[in-house]
Image: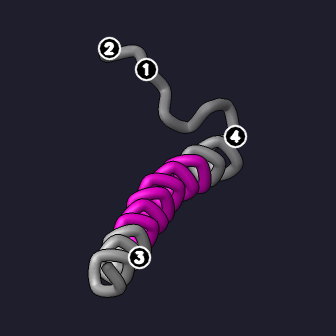
Amino acid sequence: MSDLNYSMGGYAAFVWSSVALVLGLLVWNVWSARRRLAQAMLRARRAQQARAGRS
């Protein structure tokens, strides 16, 4: 590991910005999916309560 070169032959700015972009998109994807799931569960719970209230 001591010979690992983080400068990447002059392309480090492109490589590391791409890595940061991908990690950011992955975090956003997980956050968005969890938010949509929570919203769907809330809608389902409200619909279930509305059906129970009509009976």
Q: CA distance from mark 2 to mark 3?
A: 57 Å
Say which residue appears at 59% left-offset and 48% top-offset: 22
Q: Is residue 31 magenta?
A: yes
- Residue reaching furthest front? 55
Q: Residue at x 37, y 77 (%)?
A: 51
Question: Which residue type does callout 2 highlight?
Answer: Met
Which residue position is annotated with label 1? Answer: 4
Q: How many angstroms separate mark 3 from mark 1 (CA)?
A: 57 Å
Is residue 1 placed above or below 16 in the rendered structure?
Answer: above
Q: Are marks 1 and 2 in contact (CB under 8 Å)?
A: yes
Is the magenta region chiefly helix, strand or loop?
helix
From mark 4 to mark 2, how far is it between C-alphas?
Answer: 19 Å
Question: Magenta stretch?
Answer: 20-41
- How far apart are the alpha carbons under marks 4 and 3? 57 Å
Q: Position of residue 36 (x, y in %)?
A: 48, 66
Q: Which residue is mark 2?
A: 1
**Neighbours of disc 3 within 10 Å: few (<14), some (14-19), many (20+):** few
Q: Which residue is mark 3?
A: 47
Is residue 54 one of those drawn in magenta? Answer: no
Q: Secondary structure at mark 4?
A: helix
Q: CA distance from mark 1 to mark 2?
A: 5 Å
Circle nearer the N terminus (4, 1): 1
